Image (spheres, helix red, strand yellow):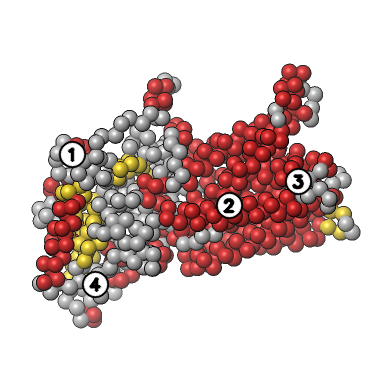
Amino acid sequence: MNIDYTALAEVWTHPDPPAPAEEMGFFTDTTVCIGCKACEVACKQWNQLPSDGFRWSGHSYDNTSALSATTWRHVAFVEQMEPESGRPPRWLMMSDVCKHCVQAPCQEACPTGSLIYNEFGNVYVQQDVCNGCGYCVAACPFGVIARDPEDGRAHKCTLCYDRQKDGLTPACAKSCPTASIQFGPLSVLRQTARDRVQQLHDRGDKDAYLYGADASGEYSALNAFFLLKDHPNVYNLPEAPRRPAAHLRTNYLFSFGASIALTLASAFLLRKDR
Amino acid sequence: MTESALPATSGNAGYYGLPMLRAPVWGWHVAWYFLLEGISAGACILSTVAQLAGDERDAAIVRTGRFVAAAALLPCPALLVADLGRPERFHHMLREFKPSSPMNTGAWALTAYSAPVGMLALKEWTGGRRASALVSRTARLVPATPLAVAALPCALTMISYPGVLLSTTSTPMWARTRLLGALVACSSMSTGAAAISFVVAARTPAADRTLGRLQRIEHVATGAEALALAGYLLSAGKTAEPLTCGRYCRLFWGGAVAVGLVAATVGRVLSKRNGRHSRPATMWSAACTIAGAWALKWALVHGGRSSAEDPTAAQYATQPQLSTPGWRPPA
């Protein structure tokens, strides 16, 4: 077996990061999504992601079901057609993606430093560093990042880091025919999104709101945020995600408290004069 | 599921009952690692405490503790490496020092812990047999007390971090509590004491004083573990359902509680008669403690998967609260 010792040592080197650029992100306006899944296809094509097989889920037009290590855009189809509720029927569609949290639990959990924020403020997995420990998978409150059983590493949306480096729009936003997926500088996107919510409210669409445009308590804002029309759980999103590392100190306090107390109790029980 | 001709609706129950979270990828390696590193670090702590606080009659605890600590530690690195998706990159764990990641802290603690524990066991081993002059002279140069003292903070970290590691996730069963770290730490201390008791009872014919002293520690550690477990179940509430009434309830109630806490305590009480300790009964109750800790750690690690895959648990765990109001439609 040929071991590349230079590569082994390079793991400990930390080259200078690129200069910070303007923070970029996604604004996904679900009110104009038509469920065409062009984003799913464009993402798979550009990122050369393998097929997930073919399977009828029985859940409306959604045969993708969830984001995964090889699916970085997923269009959810919510059919609300209950005549007994008295509401007019509606069909909600939403193109889900990695939220690129401003303070990301996966990045905080990653023990190797593989998960970083790149110069565009996006959460990125350095594939040459990831050793597939799986901690980010358990840390993510949105069930986004996943470990690929084929190659053993964690994968998720890169926000088309490679395309951004060349000044291109990410593949999903580029292919979206209705501008449901909008890509741009976050300062601009947030304003666009607020204007859009106002426009919808003025039209009488009072249930429109932004999911993740601003921080919520201990949870940071999301650099890929959404305009939704119903409760987050309807789209399989958490209503109030927690930041796991926010409780790290308290957890350690109780844990070390118990360990030290038991150690002192043992010292008392093992003292000389007994 | 659909009785009407209308398509299935997701409604307020979530999205077709699909999981909101991704199940943790950890399996049997991690459950066994948590058991063995707990035995190792618990035994190491007791051995150091016996050396510092006790007298020369506690030498059996010190010596056995050092052997148990090293023996239980031996398979640990292999278990962790085998659990990685890319085992050949295990050394990437030590690429950075990153306190926000308990797994990183644990990797550093394991590295720092293994050196003194290995050296102390080697010293005990060469001291107890006719080794070559060079080996025994080198072993005599190893300073036991400073090494034991240096191992103590590492060992405390080793029993304290696993529960915190599980808690610092979004898995409802692990994250909705402050006491998982304390529970795992108490369980590790009781298994460390039980492992020393087992070896002392198995190898030493007249060790009533040593067994009695160890038994008191085991009683205290088991009591603390029971308290931490009760606190965990109360604080985790509904999210602990995989343990209390779900897939792992038989392992949890039957193994962790009935065998690990009740049977082990009863066995210890019954093992003492007229001031003498029955060696088979001591070994039996120590084995119960260790089997119970295995059941607890297995159920905790694997129950996390059931918990993450249950969308109602995930919804319950992410209800708005004062510190996190969340995002929802306007009222």
What residue is at 31 percent from the left and 49 percent from the top?
A68
Residue B38, position in %: x, y?
61, 47
Task: Provide the residue designation for mark 3.
Answer: B53
- Disc 4 marks which residue? B330
Q: Which residue is mark 2?
A: A256
Inter-mark Cα distance, 3 to 4? 63 Å
Mark 4 residue type: Pro
The local crowd at label 1, few if under 14, some if 14 to 19, many if 20 or more residues have their Cα within 10 Å, is: some
Dot 1 falls on a residue whose secondary structure is helix
Cα distance in 3D space between marks 3 and 1: 64 Å
Q: Nearer the viewer, mark 3 or mark 1?
A: 3
According to the image, label 1 marks what residue? A163
Q: Are marks 4 and 2 in contact (CB under 8 Å)?
A: no
Q: Is residue B129 above or below residue B61?
A: above
Considering the numbered disc 4 on the image, is that residue within a helix, a strand or a loop?
Answer: loop
How many residues crowd around disc 4 within 10 Å: few (fewer than 14), some, or many (20 or more)?
Answer: few
Residues at circles 3 and 2 in contact by the CB criterion of under 8 Å: no
